[in-house]
Amino acid sequence: GAVVSQHPSWVICKSGTSVKIECRSLDFQATTMFWYRQFPKQSLMLMATSNEGSKATYEQGVEKDKFLINHASLTLSTLTVTSAHPEDSSFYICSARLRQYNEQFFGPGTRLTVL
Amino acid sequence: GIQVEQSPPDLILQEGANSTLRCNFSDSVNNLQWFHQNPWGQLINLFYIPSGTKQNGRLSATTVATERYSLLYISSSQTTDSGVYFCAVALQAGTALIFGKGTTLSVSS
């Protein structure tokens, strides 16, 4: 299957700082990438859809000015959590879809802890 | 929006037992995938199965699209099968997956 990587795998930051998470499709071109958030013992919740070369589409309740998404190429999407607060602590997971297929593949996730 | 319901929420098995996990969805879907989330959080693709039946080793899955449900079968379970199993669906091609709440499987030796 297709490989999706995320960096970093975990990050600890102080409240008020910004954190950038990278999502890369390693062996395929992804026209669309998705960002999810998962709190402990819960399911994955969609945050936004990221299309290469266009603005991301955010789900209701997700602040676009707080969670900045950039999809600058067919293999890279980034999520920046701006002015992070402890309630932003979560597991952030990206997924990507091959251009010609419907199946989606997920990255290993990034665990963010805001102190 | 579409509703995705998984059952049972928790399942405890002895090694070697068989199990069936169910996923019901409330609307016609273009994509249905089953995942296993390992202890480190990685989602492992098990099946891409918007319809029909597939098998991969001890695992198999069946989706009856007209009746809006999918089943994941695990035979001869092993301790390494433990973890959370998610069903996820998408209404249209290329759109995001919507996840069920998952089934937590615990297999003991």
Image (spheres, helix red, strand yellow):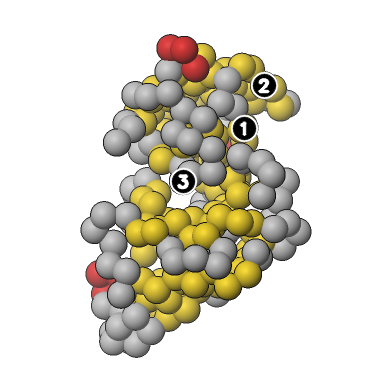
Which element is circle 1 on?
strand
Q: Tell me the kind of residue under disc 2.
A: Lys
Disc 1 marks which residue? B47
Disc 2 marks which residue? B54
Residue B105 seen from this side: no
Image location (x, y in percent) of residue B12 = 43, 28
Between B27 and A109, which is closer to the camera in this rendering?
A: B27
Which quarter of the rendering shows the C terminus of chain A? Answer: bottom left
Residue A76 seen from this side: yes
Q: Residue at x 35, y 59 (%)?
A: A58
Disc 3 marks which residue? B96
Q: Residue at x 56, y 64 (%)?
A: A52
In this figure, what is the number of numbered marks? 3
Q: In the displayed structure, would residue B21 be above or below residue A76?
A: above
Q: Are marks 2 and 1 in contact (CB under 8 Å)?
A: yes
For the residues labelled 2 and 1, the Cα–Cα distance comes to 8 Å
Say if labels 2 and 3 share a chain. yes
Which element is circle 3 on?
loop
Q: Earlier in the sequence, mark 2 or mark 3?
A: 2
Q: Earlier in the sequence, mark 1 or mark 3?
A: 1
The label on residue A28 is: none
Q: Quadrant of residue A53?
A: bottom right
Say if labels 2 and 1 share a chain. yes
Image location (x, y in percent) of residue B39 = 52, 51
Q: Is residue A2 left or right of residue A46?
A: right
Q: Residue at x 75, y 59 (%)?
A: A27
Between B6 and B67, which is closer to the camera in this rendering?
A: B67
